[in-house]
Amino acid sequence: MKRSLKDFSQKRRMYGRMFILPWEIGFVIFFLIPLAQSLMFVFSNVTIGQSDFNTVWTGMDNINYIFNQSPKYVENLVDSLTSFTYSIPLVVALSLIVAVMLNQKFKGRVIFRSIFFLPVIIATGVVMNYIQGDAAAEALRSGGAEASSSGVNVTEILQGMNLSTEITDFLVGFVNQIFNLFWDCGVQIVLFISGLQSIPEQLYEVCKVEGANEWEKFWYVTFPMLSGTTLLVVVFTAIEIFTDSANLVMKQAYAAMQQQIYDRSAAMLWVYFALVGLILGVVVLLLQKKIFAKWAT
C-alpha cells in the first residue's frame, strides 16, 4: 500500500514537471537569457555584427555617461522617481476608497463597477488607438487641465490668477495627474473588491455587538484583513508605473534603443530598475514592519 502511494506521488510530480516544462523553457529562452544579456550590455560597448551583438567590456563607462553626459537623463530620472513615490500611495488610497464604496449593497453596483473598469478595457483595445490619434479625445483622457467634461480650462483659470509660471505648471501637472490616476485604478479596484468580499461577515457582526462605529470597523477589521491584497496592489501599481510608456526615462531609453544604442539604453533602464526596486522594497518593508505588524500582535 505504501509503495503504491509512493509511486502515485512520484507520477504526480513527474506529470506536474512535464506540465510546467514548456513554461520553464520559455522563461529561460525568452526572459532569463535576454535579461542577463541586457545586464551585460550595461558594462560593455555594444556593436551590431552580421549575426549577433559584439560586446567589448568597458566597466562603468555607460553609467558614467548617462549621469554626466547624457542630456536630461538625471532630470528625467528625478521626475520619474518623484512621480513614482507619490503615485503609489495615491493610487492605493483612491482604489481602496472606491472599492469600499462599490462593495456596498445598492442597486446598480454592477454597472458602476463596470464603469470604473472601462478604462482598463479601453486602454488595451482598438479604441485606445483612436483616442491617441484624436487630439480632443486624448486631451480628455490625459487630464483635465486643457480639456474637461465641463469645458473648464484649468490652465486659463490659473493664468488669470496671475500666478507664477512655476506654480501654474505645478498645479496643471497635479490636476493632470489626478485624472490619470483615476484612469489607472481599474485593476486595483477589482483586486480590493475581491479582498473585501473575502472578509468574513462575522467579524463585522462582532464589531456591531461591541458598539464599534464605521470608522473603527474599517481600521480594526477591513484594513488589517486587506494587508495581503494591499501588498499585491502596491507591487502591481509599481510595475504598472515603472513600465508606463509615458514615463520619461522609458521614453529616453526607447529612443536610444531605436537608434541602436543598446548599451546606453540598457544602462538607463537598469539604473532606473535598481532605484525603483530599492524604493519599492522600502515601501513594502515599512508596510509589513510598521503598519500591518500593528494588528498582528
Image (cartoon, rainbow, N blue to C red):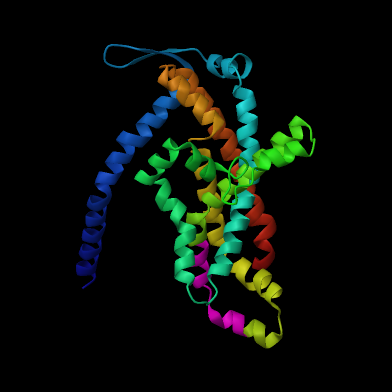
Q: Quadrant of residue 261?
A: top left
Q: Which is the main secondary structure of the residues drawn in magenta?
A: helix
Query: Compared with residue 244, is residue 296 higher up or lower down, i.e. above or below?
Result: below
Query: Compared with residue 136, is residue 228 higher up or lower down, i.e. above or below?
Result: below
x 44%, y 38%: residue: 134
x 63%, y 84%: residue: 206
Residue 266 in view of the camera: no
Query: Where is the C terminus found, in terms of image quarters?
Result: bottom right
Queried whether the magenta region covers residue 296, the answer comes back as no
Query: Compared with residue 28, is residue 189 higher up or lower down, i.e. above or below?
Result: below
Where residue 1 sits: x, y (%)? 21, 73
Query: Compared with residue 56, is residue 121 higher up or lower down, i.e. above or below?
Result: below
Queried whether the magenta region covers residue 202, the answer comes back as yes
x 55%, y 14%: residue: 61
Residue 189 in view of the camera: yes
Which contiguous range is marked in magenta?
A: 191-205
Q: Nearer the viewer, residue 125 or 208?
A: 125
x 32%, y 35%: residue: 30
Where residue 188 sits: x, y (%)? 51, 56
Q: Quadrant of residue 259?
A: top left
Where residue 24 sits: x, y (%)? 30, 43
Q: Number of callouts in the render?
A: 0
| Furthest-bottom residue in this view | 209
Q: Nearer the viewer, residue 229 or 140?
A: 140
Please indicate whether residue 287 sits to the left or right of residue 253 in the image. Answer: right
Where residue 4 sits: x, y (%)? 19, 68
